[in-house]
Image: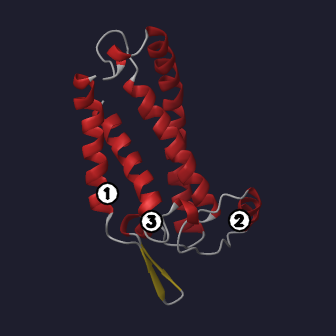
Amino acid sequence: MWLGSAALTLILFRIFWGLFAGDYARFDRFSLRLSALSVYAAQLIKRTPPSHAGHSPAGSWSVVLILAITLTQSITGLMSSDAIFTEGPLVPMVPNEIVDTATNIHHWVSKMVLAIVVLHLLAVFYYEAICKQQILLAMITGSKKLQGQTARERPAAAILLALAAGGLVWLIYLMPEIW
């Protein structure tokens, strides 16, 4: 349950970051056109993808899929129960039919979470080892060197993460007592 809460906190942080970040992490800078993705995929196969300051078309789709899958996992976890030891904090507030459905979805989506994590790690390895693009450090630091320039994000991430964590704790653990 703590891992699920941590995942939900990170998802909320990434959503805030996608709305309020600097240039490169904003959702409105993502390239989600299928035509751009197909051109980029062909470049990936040739091992010649262009370097991007922000998210490439593949990276844009990756972020959207990771957020959707992990958000689904987190939300269904809040309403899931194993009927023995563990139940999400919202289980007492929702009908049993919803708990059963959420539990089934939660189990099914857990396999998708594992698959997307493995796919993401393989993609990072491919970029680093095969395409010779150093994206791992850029993913961690928010800074990437491109043709003599450095693209950087604003350092407000810690503040947004703290707000997301505080909001999550308030929503999940304090609000049910008020409801």
What amino acid is found at the position of numbered circle 3 in the picture? Leu
Q: Secondary structure at mark 3?
A: helix
User: Which quadrant of the figure contains the N terminus?
Assistant: top left
What amino acid is found at the position of numbered circle 2 in the picture? Tyr
Q: CA distance from mark 2 to mark 1?
A: 31 Å
Quickly name the residue at label 3.
Answer: 136
Tell me, what colour scheme is on the image? secondary structure
User: Callout 1: few (<14), some (14-19), or many (20+) C-alpha neighbours within 10 Å?
Assistant: many
User: Callout 3: few (<14), some (14-19), or many (20+) C-alpha neighbours within 10 Å?
Assistant: some
Q: Which disc, if any, is residue 160?
A: 1
> Between tags 2 and 1, which lies in front?
1
- Identify the residue shown where x is 54% and y is 40%: 115
> Between tags 3 and 2, which lies in front?
2
Quickly name the residue at label 2.
Answer: 40
**Comes first in the chain, label 3 or label 2:** 2
- Identify the residue shown where x is 59% and y is 62%: 30
Question: Residue 160 in the image: x percent, y percent?
Answer: 31, 57
**Comes first in the chain, label 3 or label 1:** 3
Is residue 6 shown left or right of residue 56? left
The tally of labels here is: 3
Extreme residue in the bottom direction: 148
Q: CA distance from mark 3 to mark 2?
A: 19 Å
User: Which quadrant of the figure contains the C terminus?
Assistant: top left
Q: Which corner quadrant of the image does residue 174 belong to?
A: top left
Question: Residue 136 in the image: x percent, y percent?
Answer: 44, 65
- Whether label 3 touches label 1, CB < 8 Å: no
What amino acid is found at the position of numbered circle 1 in the picture? Leu
- Identify the residue shown where x is 44% and y is 15%: 99
